[in-house]
Image (spheres, helix red, strand yellow):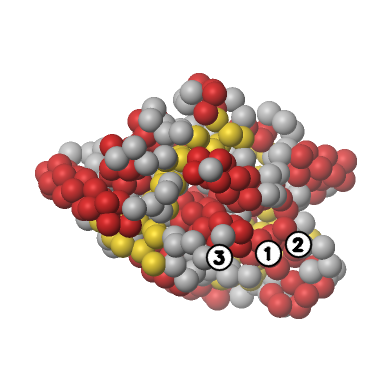
Amino acid sequence: MISGGGTGGHIYPAIAIANAWKEKHPDSEVLFVGALGKMEMQKVPEAGYQIVGLPVAGLQRKLTLANLSFPFKLMKSLSQASDIVKDFRPNVVVGVGGYASGPVLYAAQGKKIPTLVQEQNSYAGLTNKILAKRAKKICVAYPDMNQFFPEDRIAYTGNPVRKDILHLDGKREQALEHFGLDPERKTVLVLGGSLGARTLNQGMLKDMKAFDRDGYQVLWQSGKFYFKDMLEATEKASLKHIHLREFIKEMDLAYAAADIIISRAGALSVSELSLVGKPVIFIPSPNVAEDHQTKNALAYVVHDAAVLLKDKEAVGHLKEKTDEVLSNPELVGSLGKNIKKLAKPLAAEAIVNEIEQLIA
């Protein structure tokens, strides 16, 4: 049983773990448990797995009416999670973070079923810190996580990522053709996640004319929330080398085309980019719990494996920071080499090995 979700950063690692498990154990049953109304309820069935939903929701940090229903949703979810665990009778339960993982792992631990927590970030979330106290194993993506978890139960596995990203060699020509890019221009890939990042989009609006004028081309994923406004702005500007997309499905080709990548620093993005092995400018979102994106980025910056640009300083400086990196071939080489040293390409398989040990 695999529980959690809410964002792609939780869902895609969960699916990767399930896929790696099914490769080794094709006859076993895998059941996902998610939160009703969240994206896992769509993405997991699309990946070919059964999922059931709980009514659990998060506690808002601000005082809102939604918080009044939180205790009732939590109690109902705990009761339903207990029934789901009892009916499915899993050999092991994996929690990947997100609203649903709390009630499900709590129920499993109460029934003495082995649990494994997968923490994607360099700063552990509150739910995972609580669940880890009774978990048999905690799989982490960053070193020095013993500040949050019992050291004797930590496995440094990395974050599972999509398989196609492992094989980028020889795809550049195909990528340039796919996106209609000019092979003579340096390609800047801008990623703000599937929903989008306000700062990255504002920064691109500010600098897109300069990028186009000075010999760059930009493959720009604006995200769902911002696409309409960005499309209006780019069409009005009529810039030949600014390639706007709401969402980029073919991420392997996008990475293959890129000379440099400007990205938020969500756990999954950081893990993917370490496998890509190209210069990265991280602009961490300040709007996340415990400012964990900044901590994710700094874990790479301290190894000279990425460049950090603060969110509040980003608008008006995307082009300047890009120039700074790409004008220095030695820096380009060292950033790509150093970030690849931190990659964990077999993370899903490593987590599967840990699961097997729990039920051996």
Name the residue rendered at 61%, 35% in the picture: 156
Which residue in the structure is indicated by mark 1? Answer: 164
Q: Which residue is mark 3?
A: 26
Image spot of residue 129 (x, y percent): 40, 30
Q: Nearer the viewer, residue 275 or 182?
A: 275
Q: Are marks 3 and 2 in contact (CB under 8 Å)?
A: no
Neighbourhood count class around disc 1 (C-alpha, 10 Å): few under 14, some 14–19, many 20 upward: few
In percent of the image, x 42 and y 53: which residue is there?
2
Asked which quadrant contains residue 226, the reply is bottom left
- Tell me the SS state at disc 3: loop
The amino acid type of the residue labelled 3 equals Pro
Q: Nearer the viewer, residue 283 or 314?
A: 283
- Is residue 156 left or right of 345 when viewed as pictured? left
Helix, strand or loop at label 1? It is helix
- Disc 1 residue type (three-letter): Asp
Q: Could you tell which of marks 3 and 2 lies nearer the N-terminus?
A: 3
Residue 169 in the image, given as x and y percentages of width and height: 82, 63
Q: CA distance from mark 3 to mark 2?
A: 24 Å
Tell how many labels: 3
Mark pair 1, 2: CA separation:
6 Å
Residue 350 appears in the rendering: yes
Q: Earlier in the sequence, mark 1 or mark 3?
A: 3
- Mark 1–mark 2 CB contact (< 8 Å): yes
Q: Does residue 127 lie above or below 202 as drawn?
A: above
Give residue 275's position: percent from left, percent from top: 71, 50
